[in-house]
Amino acid sequence: GAVVSQHPSWVICKSGTSVKIECRSLDFQATTMFWYRQFPKQSLMLMATSNEGSKATYEQGVEKDKFLINHASLTLSTLTVTSAHPEDSSFYICSAEEGLAGPGTQYFGPGTRLTVL
Amino acid sequence: GDSVTQMEGPVTLSEEAFLTINCTYTATGYPSLFWYVQYPGEGLQLLLKATKADDKGSNKGFEATYRKETTSFHLEKGSVQVSDSAVYFCALSSNTGTASKLTFGTGTRLQVTL
């Protein structure tokens, strides 16, 4: 149980285009989902917290107009990287909080590798 | 703010060796503590957790004890296997309103050889 999927697993795009990444909780409902960015050989940096039916809460330094987050249902959150540039190339990971497992217990998706040319 | 400090890797051990990965934290209040593991090519998986002082989390032969007096949550395993090769992340959870945010350490890569 508690499986989180992401799609696509990798994407290559041209500079200036937009890319959408989907995050789904497959067997549980997630009122809260999180989006992280992971740089090579570094830890995960929280970008934003996404709550179903409301606006996402962004961490300091994260551009909300560049990284659009939509949490339309209890099983789906999307991250859209708008007007992507090479510096946006990274590994993006989502997670979902499964309330019954206790506070702070998050289940992670496998990640999406974004390469912007 | 909250922070987690882990020992830098990589850690290279022979199979059946004893493993310790140190983790210390700084937080206000009483956070929950976690160890997550990331196997090559896969997403992070919860390995174990502890929610209050003196609690011991354990799973798959790994264990860690929540030590409030030393603000530590060191990960240990008595006999590692090649299949334990992965990156291990220590994390803490601070409750902020309705969401529980995780703060991660930098990760420690473990390589186990035959």
Image (cartoon, rainbow, N blue to C red):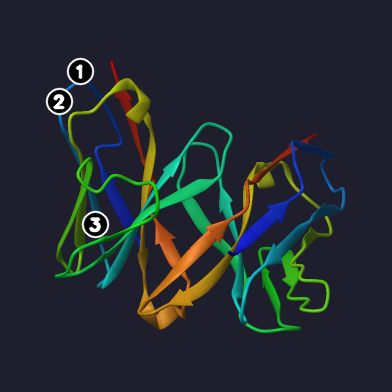
**The N terminus of chain A sits in image quarter:** bottom left
Residue A17: which numbered mark, if any?
2
Q: The residue under label 1 is which amino acid type? A: Lys
Q: Which residue is label 3 attached to?
A: A24
* Mark 3 neighbour density, 10 Å: few (under 14) some (14–19) many (20 or more): many
Q: Residue furthest right?
A: B17
Q: Residue at x 15, y 31 (%)?
A: A18
Q: On the picture, is A95 further left or further right than B102? A: left
Q: Which residue is label 1 attached to?
A: A14
Q: Residue B101 location in percent, x, y?
A: 45, 67
Q: The residue under label 3 is which amino acid type? A: Arg
Circles 2 and 3 on the same subunit: yes
Q: Nearer the viewer, residue B113 or B45?
A: B45
Q: The residue under label 2 is which amino acid type? A: Thr
Q: CA distance from mark 1 to mark 3?
A: 26 Å
Q: CA distance from mark 1 to mark 2?
A: 6 Å
Identify the element where label 2 is drawn. Answer: loop
Q: Residue A28 location in percent, x, y?
A: 28, 71
Say if mark 1 contacts mark 2, CB within 8 Å: yes
Identify the element where label 1 is drawn. Answer: loop
Say if mark 1 contacts mark 3, CB within 8 Å: no
Q: CA distance from mark 2 to mark 3?
A: 23 Å
Q: On the picture, is A68 further left or further right than B87? A: left
Tag in front: 1 or 3 = 1
